[in-house]
Image (cartoon, rainbow, N blue to C red):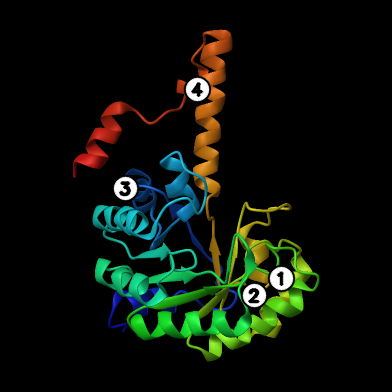
Amino acid sequence: MTDSPAAAFLALHRPGAGFVLPNAWDPGSARILEQVGFPAIATTSAGIAFSQGLPDAGMPGPAMLEAVARIVAAVDCPVTADLESGYGDVPGTFAAAVGLGVVGANLEDADRDGLFELDDAVERVEAARAAAPRGSFVLNARTDPYMVRHPDAFAESVRRAHRYLEAGADCIFVPGVSDAQEIRRLVAEIGAPVNVVAGLTEPVLDAATLRALGVARISTGGTLTRAVLTLVETAGREMLQHGTFGFAAGALPYGDLQRRFGS
């Protein structure tokens, strides 16, 4: 029997389990995803920024933590947070996240200027681990060689993953990889729970395929937010150009949402 929400959340991270972890961007989306039946949800820093009319990485840490706090307060299921690269203060940011009641968080090893030097990145993981102790917080160390188009993204991802695991990470997040055989090799070489993101790059592999490759965790990042904003743009063009409202077909009824959000 698990003794904490974080322990229960970590127990989902089994190689090959490939549990789907959707990313919410506000309390409403979080509540809908919880009501659908997901056992846990994540936040998306990109989606939260987009919902505020800002680019990804365009929000300061305090504002992002406030947004995460609103999502945590809106649901009963465990929430893990996307904390980007720590907002210039990894220990402070992760200590604040612990105080919000999240069960875990991502930590990135890159910013707009590219990958951090490996020793620096390792120190960041160690600082996050010290602020968010093992057993009460699931630390998902993200490594971005594929995102920055490193010339040997596979080898660099594995090298960094091993160092982050030694520094205290519970699992490794490798976004930007979509080749099935590359994912299989990453899982084998990293030798710990691996998280990939669905919908970020083509081809978009389904959950069954990713499970067969050994993936432990499948998140969606900003994909759901982008899909919703695409619907808004498409509906806007329909109204402006054609004067029709076909987008309303199939929408959740007003009364249904009132009941869901009124509880």
**Amino acid type for the residue under numbered disc 3:** Pro
Say whether disc 2 or disc 4 marks the residue closer to the N-terminus.
2
Alpha-carbon span between mark 3 and mark 2: 32 Å
**Quarter of the figure with the N terminus:** bottom left
Alpha-carbon span between mark 1 and mark 4: 37 Å
x 26%, y 29%: residue:
255
Say whether disc 1 or disc 3 marks the residue closer to the N-terminus.
3
Alpha-carbon span between mark 1 and mark 3: 33 Å
The residue singled out by tag 3 in the image is 27
How dense is the environment of label 2, judged by Cα within 10 Å: few (below 14), some, or many (20 and up)?
Answer: many
The residue singled out by tag 4 in the image is 247
Q: Return the mark for residue 214.
A: 2
The residue singled out by tag 1 in the image is 183
1 and 4 marks in contact (CB < 8 Å): no
x 40%, y 56%: residue:
60
Between circles 3 and 2, the one closer to the viewer is: 3
